[in-house]
């Protein structure tokens, strides 16, 4: 599955290759070759990411896109919101559900670090 991207071309496919809002995607031709192609993605949103702004950590939350085609960042910084890290509870492995729920009740966003969470 390839979404909201730009590719120089595509060759070969096994099972079902799905393209949604991809510039340069092959034409819709399922089942042979196995390409399912949508010209745009009806609704999508890129993943939030942590970044450093000077000495401050922030989380960038991209805006929802409608009828998207191509990348959101091709013409510069995409639309979205930067949220200071102090508005987050950084969840670390070992945190229990009560601790996480307490952070949510305080109005904090959650940022999960890699790990296994038994909640």
Image (tube, grey):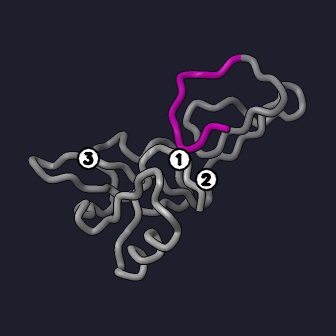
Magenta-drawn segment? 1-11
For the residues labelled 3 and 2, the Cα–Cα distance comes to 27 Å
Front residue of this view, candidates 57 and 75: 57
Q: Tag 2's secondary structure? A: strand
Q: Does residue 101 sit above or below 1 in this rendering? A: below
Locate the N terminus by quadrant.
top right
Instruction: Give residue 41's mark.
Output: 2
Q: x, y (%) of residue 64?
A: 47, 63
**Residue underneath mark 1:** 69
> Going by the picture, which residue comes out furthest to the right?
31
Nearer to us: label 3 or label 1: 3
Would you name the residue on which mark 3 appears? 51
Q: CA distance from mark 3 to mark 1?
A: 25 Å
N-term-proximal mark, 3 vs 1: 3
The residues bearing labels 1 and 2 have C-alpha atoms spaced at a distance of 7 Å
Q: In the picture shown, does residue 54 fall above or below 88?
A: above
- Label 2 near label 1: C-beta < 8 Å? yes
């Amino acid at each position: 599955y390839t979404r909201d991207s730009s590719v120089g071309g595509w060759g070969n496919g096994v099972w079902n290759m799905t393209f949604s809002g991809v510039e340069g995607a092959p034409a819709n031709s399922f089942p042979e070759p196995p390409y399912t192609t949508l010209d745009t993605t009806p609704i999508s949103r890129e993943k939030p990411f942590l970044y450093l702004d000077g000495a401050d950590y922030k989380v960038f939350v991209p805006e929802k896109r409608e009828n998207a085609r191509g990348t959101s960042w091709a013409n510069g910084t995409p639309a979205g919101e930067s949220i200071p890290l102090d508005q987050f509870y950084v969840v670390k492995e070992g945190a229990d559900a009560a601790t996480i729920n307490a952070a949510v009740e305080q109005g904090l966003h959650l940022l999960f670090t890699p790990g296994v969470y038994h909640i």
